[in-house]
Amino acid sequence: MAPVEAVEAEPEPPRNQGNYRITDEDKLGSGSLKQKCRHNLAAIELLKKLENEGRAATEAEKRILVRYVGWGGLPQVFDAWNEQWQEERERLEQLLTPDELDSTRATTLNAHYTAPLVIRAMYGALQRLGFKLGRILEPALGLGHFIGLMPDEMHAHSLITGVEIDSVTARLAKLLYPDADIRQQPFEDTKLADGFYDVAISNIPFGDYKPFDPRFKAWSFVIHDYFFAAALEKVRPGGLVLFITSKGTLDKVDGALREYVAGQADLLGAIRLPNDAFKKNANTEVTTDIVILRKRLPGEAPSGPAWKAITEITNSLG
């Protein structure tokens, strides 16, 4: 396998200077469920205020916006029979339009934001692979933590694109990261150029539903598998894909996605995360993997086919 190519372009003058930089002082994901809900409501209230006033967020206001944790860990807020959350539910209904409320309710399936420790580890892996700066795609942006926690030099000299399906979340992200190109639409509807990006990095949505994209109609990929296939279209030959995904991507008996990916990319590594890796930030316990792929150059031989198949291995514990 050819070595991973570092981007050797001369650094341009710093860009992205208007983007928020997340620090430990932001205490992302801290607090009880009630406190997290209050952070969400405060962020939405501020969003509406800024939009009504037609202005950008100050640094102090961005510190309020960045505490938004989404609703993946707070589905009970939308349960009309749950009296313990009636006050918060009524306030949310006051703040949002019916369409915004429907869109926000739909995010309870997948809005589980990533812990800073995991994001920093992924960027550490990216740097060890030789990547310094370039064109970076975040196809499941959420609030934008992968932008806010990007290493300083990489952030200052990279072109950053983010895609987020939910209107409220995308608008919050645009206030936090005004110098990034943030698209509010499903990933399958984007018109991003193929072969343009050096890196795609994200915590992608998981689920059994299948997005419609005519390019992959024959494969009928579920959502997390679809993100791998579509992201490989967007990165250049030699480019990298680093995704947090459901354990099913590598574990499931159906090897269609692994077969598809192995046809054009090499598996550089995979790490299984503890099932409580999202407990603090997203109030969920789920088994996930970090998967790192490198898209092969034209005519380059694959590094090996072994990872396409799965097998059961017995250890000392059975």
Image (spheres, rainbow, N blue to C red):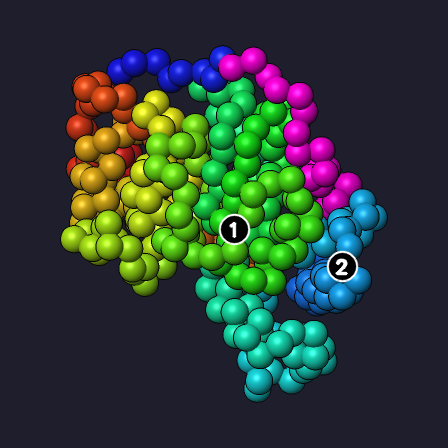
Horizontal side, residue 10 vs residue 60: left or right:
left
Please name the residue that numbered disc 2 is placed on. 54
Q: Where in the figure is residue 87, as x and y percent of width and height? A: 72, 80
Task: Give the Cα distance between marks 2 and 1.
Answer: 19 Å
* Amino acid type of the residue that numbered disc 1 sits on in the rendered structure: Arg
Q: Main secondary structure of the magenta part?
A: loop
Instruction: Name the image quarter holding residue 99.
Output: bottom right
Q: Which residues are magenta?
A: 9-30
Vertical arrangement, residue 297 with respect to residue 147, above or below: above
Judging from the image, what secondary structure is the residue with disc 1 in? strand
* Amino acid type of the residue that numbered disc 2 sits on in the rendered structure: Gly
Residue shown at 66% from the left, 21% from the top: 13
Q: Which of disc 1 and disc 2 is earlier in sequence?
A: 2
Please check the rendered image and state whether residue 114 is part of the magenta-colored stretch, yes or no. Answer: no
Query: Are there few (<14), some (14-19), or many (20+) residues within 10 Å of tag 2?
Result: few
Q: Where in the figure is residue 109, as x and y percent of width and height? A: 46, 64
Vertical arrangement, residue 244 with respect to residue 136, above or below: below
Q: Report the front residue among 85 and 98.
A: 98
Q: Report the front residue among 209 and 195.
A: 195
Please name the residue that numbered disc 1 is placed on. 183
